[in-house]
Structure formats: C-alpha cells, structure tokens
Image (cartoon, rainbow, N blue to C red):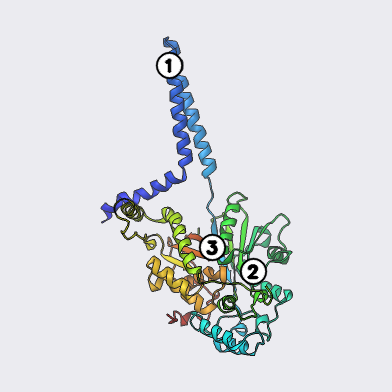
Amino acid sequence: MATSSLPFSLLAPAYRFVASRRITLAGFSFSATAALRVTSWLSSTLTTTHHQTLLHAGRLTLLAAIVALLLYITSRRLRQRPVYLVDYACFRPPSSLRVPLAKYVEHAELAPCFDAKSVGFQFRLIERSGFGEETCLPPALHLIPPEKTLNAARAEAERGIFSAVDAVLAKTGVCAQDIGVVVVNCTLFSTTPCMADMVVRRYGLRSDVRCFNLSGMGCSAGITGVGLAQNILQRGDDAAYALVVSTEILTSDYYSGDERAMLLQNCLFRMGASAALLSTSRAHARRTTRRGERGIALSKEVMSVAGDTLTAHMATLGPLVLPASEILAYALSFVARRVFNRGVKPYIPDFRTAFEHFCIHAGGRAVIDELQRGLGLSDELVEPSRMALHRFGNTSSSSVWYELAYLEAKCRVRKGDRVWMIGFGSGFKCNSAVWVCLRPPAALVSGPWDGCMHRYPVATVQ
C-alpha cells in the first residue's frame, strides 16, 4: 500500500510548487529561450575561432546572469515568513447572564413589542436550535423592555473584548507595547472612534500601532482578520505581535417587531468574544476569518447560497491541502463527467485526508448538519461545533475559537495535527484558516470550558 501511494504523495508537492511559481517559471523559460536564440544568431554571424570563444563565454555569462536574476526575484517574491499563533482566549460570560429557554419566553411574553404568534415562533426556533440552557445575552437585553442604547452597546463591547484581551495577555506574558497590529471585527456595531481605537486606548499601545476595524462582514470576519494580520506581519518587524479580536454586539440591534425573518437574529445569536495573538517569532508559537424596528433579515435561501459558496471555496482550497490521490480522483471524475457522461456522480474529495480536526462555524444546527453530510464527517469530527453551539450559542465570528478551545480541553490536538477553521459570512462569504500544531498544548487550567467540560459531549436536538 505504501509503495503504490508513493507517486501520488510526490505529485501534490510538485503540483503546489508549479502552481505557486508558474509566473516565475514561465519567465525563466522565456528568458532562457530568448538568450539562446540571441546567442545562436550571433554565432551564425561570427566565424573566427577567437570570436567563437568569446561567444561561448558570453553565452555562459548571459545565462548565469539570467538565472541569478530570476532566482533573486523568486526569493524576494516568495520569501514569506510563517505566522504563528502564540495563544488565544475566549470570553466566558458570567452565569448571571444566562438565558434558559423558559426565561427567554417569559421575557418575550412580558415585552410589549411581541404578540403571541411572535413569541410562539421564537420558542419553536430556539427549542430546535441546538442551544443548551447556559447561553448568554448581554445585560441590556435582560431588561423589560430591552435597553438598546449606545452606552449599553459600548458596555457590552468593553466587557467581552477587554475580558478576552486581558486573558490572552495574561496567558502569554506579552507586553502591550510589543503589539504592532490590532484587528477588531464586529459586524453590526460600528462606532466612531472604532473599537480598535478602544483597545489601543485601554491598553496604552504605542503611537505607531496599525489599527483595523472590520464591520459588515458577518460570521467569517474573524478568519478574515487573521488573514489581514498575517499579511501585515509577513511584511513587518520580526518582533511585532498582532492582536486579532472577534466579537458581535447584540444590544444595539435587538429586534422588537413581528417580522419573522428579522426575529431570527434575536433567537440565534448569543454573547461571546475572542482574542488571538499572532507573531512571526516561533519562540512561543503553538500553531502556524423601515418604519418600526431595525434588525437583520435572514432568508430561507441562505442555505442554498452557502452550499454554492462552499463548493467554490473547496475548489480553491483543495489543491493546496489535499493529497495528490484525492486531487487525481477529482480530476478523473471531472473529465469523465465532461467527456463521457454528464450523469456520472461528481467525486467529492475527502477532506478528512487533509485535516485531523474541523472547527466549523457554529451558525446553527442546520449549518452543521449540512456540512457534516456534504463533507462526510463523523459525529466526533463535528462534535466541537455542536457542543460550542449548545454551550455558548452562535457567537458569530468568535465561534471557531470556542471550538478550538473544546478540542484542547479534550486533549485531542497533538503535534503535527492540522485544524481547519471555516467560517461563513454575509455577502455570501466563506473563509478558511488552516493551522498546524507545532507542539501539544498544555492542559488548560482555565478557559471558556472550565467547570463544565466533564458534562460534554451531550446529546443535542437532531
């Protein structure tokens, strides 16, 4: 078995090498061919032995110069330093903010903005959502009626963001002055000054820190923020750290109306935040996105659109991570469908051959079900997503970090393991982050799952 699979294992690196350097290789071929053509033309015009000797020396010099130039250009273009995950932390809301289903329904019945049909709709939706009894909402939404003010929203932001950042700085021992990049993402709540400025002011970061505030990008923005920080670090100082904060603020956009498509946000989103510290230094690395009430509408077409987006995303990601055997099987299936019979069932690559762990955005039970079915994943592989949804609810872009924390709390991540984080967002967007474990994480003494991990996994609504 090992002998027959050897050629396939060599094809994948060769394919990735050629694909990533196709422009440079084409330029080299063109330049070498042109140089040979020029020297050949010159040789036909020179007849003396002395001139022929000079010609051969000139030809060798010219070819050496071209090769040296192309190698220099290639090294400059492709010299990208790896970016490492130093550590991360997730905000764990206090138990005083938890919202069991009975409490949510009681508040909805007492609120003057919902009629009986709206309350019943919200009850049925949450009952089938996969949520447990410990998901949390911000303090302003525990009031009757909810306090949807700017001050209340900023208080929610400060509570979640500062708790997560405090935790990650305490875990790593990194000085705030060493942070050179700050990326904060939040879809719904965007103020001036922005939340990235709020972080800079709170921790007294240096005056030349580069700040970015991502809004309106949905639940995939956390992975987008990691990619942005990675691009900046690869072009910056070796000693720089990047802080990536992901959260969603619910207070300001709570919907107080009867339109069902807009009531979904009240039922499906819960309080959460995460902070991740990245660096190009490997020393401490662990691993290498109308009148009435304002609200957010979610339509029934979102699942079909998500499926189309995921298909296109997998076609882009697949050649970079899949083994050659899977790439070849997909290519043969594609040719068979196009040339011989369009009725041939398309081959779906087995991404389990590329990753040991999956952190699928906990956007809801239906989202996890569809990805499990489409990717052919076992219950154990989607367990982190289902348990994060059960314990914390849909925390938007920070959900994938709660899932990674679940894997580490269960001691499932080992050296060399690959973790696929995948997030979905408005627009529609699909973003991925692939992490490779450089060393086994230490046993967690605290974190979002502290005190409750012994109860998980639990049976969830199917």
Q: Position of residue 389 (x, y in %)?
A: 50, 76
The correct choice, above or below, for 390 with respect to 218 in the image is below
Please name the residue that numbered disc 1 is placed on: 43
Q: CA distance from mark 1 to mark 2?
A: 70 Å
Labels 1 and 2: the sequence-earlier one = 1
Question: In whole angstroms, how far apart are the C-alphas of marks 3 and 2?
Answer: 16 Å
Depicted 61 relative to depicted 156: above or below: above
- Residue at 65% in and 80% down: 256
Is disc 2 placed on a helix, strand or loop?
A: loop
Q: Are marks 3 and 2 in contact (CB under 8 Å)?
A: no
Q: Position of residue 350 (x, y in %)?
A: 36, 61
Closer to the chain start, of discs 3 and 2, is 2
Counting labels gives: 3
Outermost residue on the front side: it is 291
> Where is residue 51 drawn, in percent x and y?
45, 12
Q: Amino acid at mark 1?
A: Ser
Q: Depth-wise, is mark 3 or mark 1 nearer the camera? A: 3
Q: Nearer the viewer, mark 3 or mark 2?
A: 3
Residue 243 quadrant: bottom right
Left or right: 197, with 130 as reference point: right
Q: Are marks 3 and 1 in contact (CB under 8 Å)?
A: no
Residue kind at label 2, given as amino acid type:
Leu
Q: Kindly identify which numbered label has been placed on residue 428.
A: 3
Residue displayed at 40% across by 59% down: 354
Identify the residue position indicated by label 2 in the image: 188
Question: CA separation, marks 3 and 1?
Answer: 60 Å
Residue 388's disc number:
none
